[in-house]
Amino acid sequence: MKLPKRLFVSALALCMGVVAQAQQAREDFAKDITLSGAQNKAYPGPQKQLSPALEGYTPYYISHYGRHGSRYMIGKNDYDRPYDQMKKAADAGMLTEKGIEVMEKVRQIRDEAKGRDSELTPLGAQQHRDIAKRMYERFPEVFKGKTHIDAKSTTVIRCILSMENALQQLIALNPELTVTHDASAHDMYYMNFQDSVLIKQRIQGERSSELWKSNMKYDNGERVVDLLFKDKNFLKENKIDGKRLVNKIFDLATSLQNTELRDKIDLFDIFNLDEVYNYWAGGNAWWYVAYGNSPLSGGNQAFSQRNLVKKIISEADSCLAFPHPGATLRFGHDQMVMPLACLLNINGYGKQMSLDELANSDWINYRIFPMACNVQFIFYHKNDNDKDVIFKVLLNEDEAVLPDLKPFKGCYYKWSDFKEFFLKKINDYEKK
């Protein structure tokens, strides 16, 4: 049957839209290959200008949860093992000329990171100073005068240092600020909550045959093994998994952007665009199963952040009772920001879908949780007596939408609507 021209154009546009979604990551990587690092992506900063405040409304309180800034990789074996394995091959004369070049780069990266396992890098500190500065400049009314800033961090040193850098920047901009800050196990029930039930479901999802089959589509590394090593028999005889080694080198390539070597060394040159995409796509599927709302892991992983949402609500209600409440800042980890974005369904990231659907969706992890990723609630009122408070949400400092709520206007929502919807959502889950 021949479609009418109008319907044919619509169908073609729909098909092109699906193709565009499937190709979005490839297109992004062609422009900025460092995006393939996903959780290793150095914080890019806001990508858009903020819309103006609604007429008659003034920002007067900020509630924030952010990930620590750029860090070194976690686990010294991430640096030592690739170098040691390549050095063993080099000593046996089994590295190609390119392999020797790559081994020397890995050695430099390892030496820079020595003794700094998982620590905040200088770039990570700068990211939080920059975020704090933009927060101050975008919403100066929140930080004027002798207002109070309360900050909390997890007990991990990179998070504490991220918090301190942000606070130092704010105090430099306004020395009149009064600041309280803490990092205690007392607050971990909402700052870094670990739910044993959800963790069990997550592990089941990670071990599922569906995820395994999905990742088999992104099998990678064979070409690069041949590029670096003269003889695969050497790898087999020495119990070196060549593909796993190349995967670790890719991790080093993506993590390099967070260090002081980022403008001096490049490891992406040994990978082609298909390989870069495959490494990212396999990781994207894993993150969705582990921390998104994948049916494979129960469809409930986002509820790991229910205590954080309840705390955001209770602290906001307490602070909003004051005419000039300041800001509440929290510093934690990607494994909190990711499910928080999903629980709130920010920009539709709370959707449930199969892994086949995921591959053609706009659920793209590097848009959610680069280093220093953050969620900010910006609250507005008309005057000190205004009880009908509105707010907007920023994801990584860009205005976001909350599809589950009816907007008050544009990207602004009623705080009362947010509380009613998400407290009920959490309460319904906890009743199960």
Image (cartoon, grey):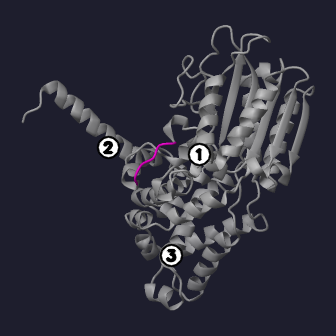
Rendered position, 252 above or below 70: below
Which residue is painted at 73% across and 64% down in the image? 112
Which residue is painted at 88% across and 45% down in the image? 182
- Residue that extends furthest to the top in the rendered view of this protein: 56
Q: Residues within 10 Å of mark 3 (few under 14, many from 20)?
A: some
Q: CA distance from mark 1 to mark 2?
A: 36 Å
Q: CA distance from mark 1 to mark 3?
A: 57 Å
Q: State the mark number for residue 429.
A: 1
Residue where numbered disc 2 is placed: 19
Asked if one can make out residue 131 in the rendered structure from this viewpoint, the answer is no
Left or right of 40 on screen, residue 241: left
- Between 417 and 51, the residue placed more toward the observer is 417
Left or right of 424 on screen, residue 204: left
Give the residues drawn in magenta, as a range: 350-354
- Between 157 and 380, the residue placed more toward the observer is 380
**Disc 3 residue type (three-letter):** Glu
Q: CA distance from mark 2 to mark 3?
A: 39 Å
**Disc 2 residue type (three-letter):** Val
Looking at the image, tell me whether mark 2 or mark 3 is earlier in sequence order.
2
Image marks 1 and 3: residues in contact by CB distance under 8 Å: no
Rendered position, 219 above or below 182: below
Q: State the mark number for residue 421.
A: none
Residue where numbered disc 3 is placed: 97
- Residue that extends furthest to the left in the rendered view of this protein: 1
x then y, percent, for residue 16 = 28, 38
